[in-house]
Amino acid sequence: MKPIAKLIVTAAAVAMSTAVLVAPARAAVEAPDALVKRVSTDVIDSVKADKDIQAGNSRKIMDLVNSKILPYVDSDKMTAQAAGRFWRQATPEQQKQLAAEFRTLLVYTYAGALSQIKNETIEFKPFRADPADTEVEVKSQVNLTRGEPITLNYRLAKGPQGWKIFDLNVLGAWLVETYKSTFASEIGKNGIDGLIKKLHDRNEQLANKPLAKSAQK
């Protein structure tokens, strides 16, 4: 993963773990900024309360990501935007496989980042949006124990199941854009199936590495 993409997802994992989880049914009527704050609070509470997670227990960390973060991330929309025009050229089966591999990559990256959380905190900026908006941006910053704060913004879209995150911005760089060039380059060389294989191979590598090291790659 490119350094900026790693930074974006790492910062996002910190934020999602530092700002009480709402049930999926309730999320449909919850404001997007409130959703991000509530999910973040629940995740950090889970990390602080479980010594196994703090020690890097892979299974527990992966379970945490799958149960308390990914339900609020629209990985299909994120994949489609990262693939750009190639998404429309892909067959339904290719779209399904690509989204699944990208989602798995996000799981490993979030899990690796969560395994390194220490005492970071998240500060949310005032939220401004029209009630009729179906896409909004929630702005925040991650306060580190050392160094300058990291700007972290979320893009969320409202769908049948409520608000979901589909993009993240750290220090001015959007996650989808950082992947778009990588996806386009690989597709240009080896086609959509080549990109699917590359993501699959990367996920296989991450599956065999300790989470702390996975987050560093």
Image: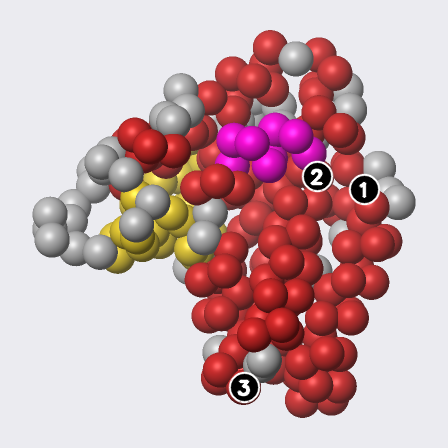
Q: Position of residue 211 (x, y in %)?
A: 77, 37
What label does residue 112 carry, if any?
2
Which residue corresponds to mark 1? 213
The residue furthest bottom is 188
Answer with left or right where residue 158 lies relative to residue 207. left
Q: Position of residue 95 (x, y in %)?
A: 58, 71
Q: Quadrant of the N terminus?
A: bottom right
Could you say whether the residue bearing mark 1 is in a helix, strand or loop? helix
Q: Give residue 60's quadrant in the image.
A: top right
Magenta segment: does it hold 139? Answer: no
Q: CA distance from mark 1 to mark 2?
A: 7 Å
Say which amino acid is labelled 3: Gln
Q: Is residue 180 above or below residue 102?
A: below
Mark 3 Cα shell of 10 Å, populated few (<14), some (14-19), many (≥20): few
The residue that appears at 78% across and 45% down in the rendered structure is: 214
Which residue corresponds to mark 3? 89
Towards the viewer: 91 or 112: 91
